[in-house]
Amino acid sequence: MSMTIVGQRTLRKVLEHHARTQPDKTFLVFEDHQEQSHSYTYRQFDRIVNRTANGLLDLGVTKGDRVNLHLTNCPEFLFFWFAIAKIGAVMVPTNPLSPLDELTYPVKHSESRVSITQPDLLPTVVALRERCPTIGQIIVIGSTKAAPGVLPFDQFVVGRSDRLAPVPVSPLDDAAILYTSGTTSLPKGVLVTHANYIYLSEVVSKLTRLGPEDRHFITLPLFHANAQYYSFMTSLNVGGSVALMPRFSASRFMVQAARYGVTITSLFAAPMRMILAQPPAPTDRDNRFRMVFFAQNITEAQLAEWEERYEAPLLQIYGMTETMGQPLTNPLDDTRDNMSIGRVTLGYECRVVDEQGCDVPVDTPGELLVKGIPGVTITKGYFKNPETTAETIRDGWLYTGDVVAVNEDGYFRFVDRAKDMIKRAGENIAAGEVEAVIKQHPAVADVAVIGVPDPMRDEAIKACIILEEGRTTTADEIIAYCAERLSKFRVPEFVEFRSEFPRTSVGKIQKHLLRRESEG
C-alpha cells in the first residue's frame, strides 16, 4: 500500500520541488516585533533548511529522534520543522506560553533529544533540561551569547553545506507529535506522518481553491495544528506564499493584511471577536481577502458585521488535530451556512451516532465519527498511548468526542464536546444549547455552561458568565431569561459572574478547570 500513498511524497520532496521549479519566487515573508519585514525565496528557504538539517545530523540526531521546538512564530520554527522532517526525525512543538510544570510532560513523554528556543524562553528550557535527561543540547535563536550547553543558532548553521545528502524517509514515517490539551489532566501526543501532512494539504488547498498566486496570512501560533495544516502546508503544496506574523494582534490585523497583500487566512471565533471589537477604520476594506475560514461558532450578528465591515467572505469549517484535514466544510459554490460547520468534505466520510454506536435520526445530536486511513487521512494514534488510541480509532472510524447534529440537507451543526454533556436526572443536556440561549442576552459577552455535582440529580447546571462592559444583570434575571426559552430541565440552577475564563492558546474555554473550581 505504501507504494501509492500521496504519490510517495514527503515534506522534503514537496519543498525541494518548489525550490527547483520556482527558486526565485518569494515563499515566506516575516514581520518581526520591530515591524521590519524579512523575506525568503523558495531557494533561500530550502538552503537554510539544509544547513539546519546538516547541523542536526552533526549533533547526532537520527531518524526517529524527537526534537522539541519551544518557539513563538518565527522563520526559525519553519527552518527546523523542515530540517527535522528531511532527516527523518520528529518535531515536537510546545506552547511557548507554557510554564515549566506544563512544559515538562510533553518534552519528557516524547523523550526529546534537542530543544530549540529563544532568549526570553531560555531560562525555562534550561530548567527543563534538569527534569528531562534526554535533552542533550539546547539551541537558542536570535542570540549570539553562548551559555553552558547552549548553542546559538547562527553558530549552529555557520559554515555548513546548503546541500543535504539523501536520507531514507517514507510517507508513513512520523514527522511530528502534536500534544493536544483535552478534558483530562495529561495531554495526548497526536502522531502526524509525512503522508498526513501531504494528504491534508491536498484536500484543504483544493477545497479552498488555493493557487500559486495566493498568500496565506498566518497569525495563529505555529506550534498548533491549525497554522501548520491549513495555512502553511496548503501554501507549500500549491507553491504559494505565506505572510507570517510573530503573534496575533487584533488592532493591527487588517493593517497587516493589507500591507502584505494576503488573500486567505484561518481564524477562530475568539480572535474574530477581538477584531470586531476594534473601532471601525476607513481602511477596514483595504484588504484582498477572498476567503477567511474559521472554526468555533460566532453569532449571526457578528457574521453580518464581519462581512459588511471587511468584505472578507467567511467560511466555517470543522477539523481537529486528529482528523488532519477538514472533514466538514461549508461549500464554495453552493449555499454557505456559516452558522453550521458545513457538509462532508470530499475524501472523508462522517457518521453521527448515539452512545450505543447506532446512527441517529436527522436533527438529533450524537457523537461525530470520521472515517479515515490511520497514518494517511487521519492520525494513526497517540504516541506511547495504545489504550487511548484503541478507544479513539475503532474499525477505521475516529471517535471525535464532539456532539453534532445533521439536517436533511446534509449540513452539520456543532452542539458540544461529548465530555461537556451534562447528565441531569436521566436527561443528557448539551451545554452548547444552553450557552446559545444565554449568549443572546444583551448583557452577556461570553458564557460557559458546565455540570456540577448534585446529590439528587447527578449533575446541576451552572452558567459562568462574563458581562459586556458597562452592563449589569443578576443571577435571577439570567435564570428567568432561560426559563422563558428553555425546557425546565435545561435551565441553570447556578449563575456565576466572572471577569475572565481559563483558555487554551487558541481561545477555547478550559471547562475542566471551571469544573475543578466549582467542585473545589
Image (cartoon, rainbow, N blue to C red):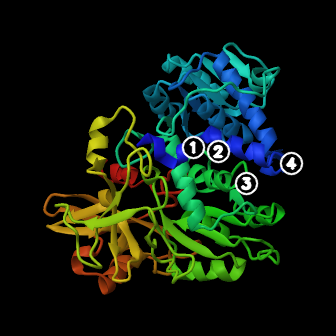
Q: Name the residue under label 3.
A: 242
Q: Mark 4 points at which residue?
A: 36
Residue 334 sits above or below residue 111 on the image:
below
Residue 392 sits above or below residue 422 on the image:
above
Q: What residue type is labelled 3?
A: Val
N-terminal-most mark, 2 or 4: 2
N-terminal-most mark, 4 or 1: 1
Q: Do the residues labelled 2 and 1 touch (CB within 8 Å)?
A: yes
CA separation, marks 2 and 4?
A: 29 Å
State the SS at label 3.
strand
Q: Name the residue under label 1.
A: 9
Q: Name the residue under label 2.
A: 14
Q: Which amino acid does label 1 sit on?
A: Arg
Q: Which amino acid does label 4 sit on?
A: Gln
Q: Is residue 396 left or right of residue 298?
A: left
Crowd band around label 3 with a 10 angstrom C-alpha radius: few (<14), some (14–19), many (20+): many
Which mark is in front, 2 or 3? 2
CA separation, marks 2 and 3?
A: 16 Å
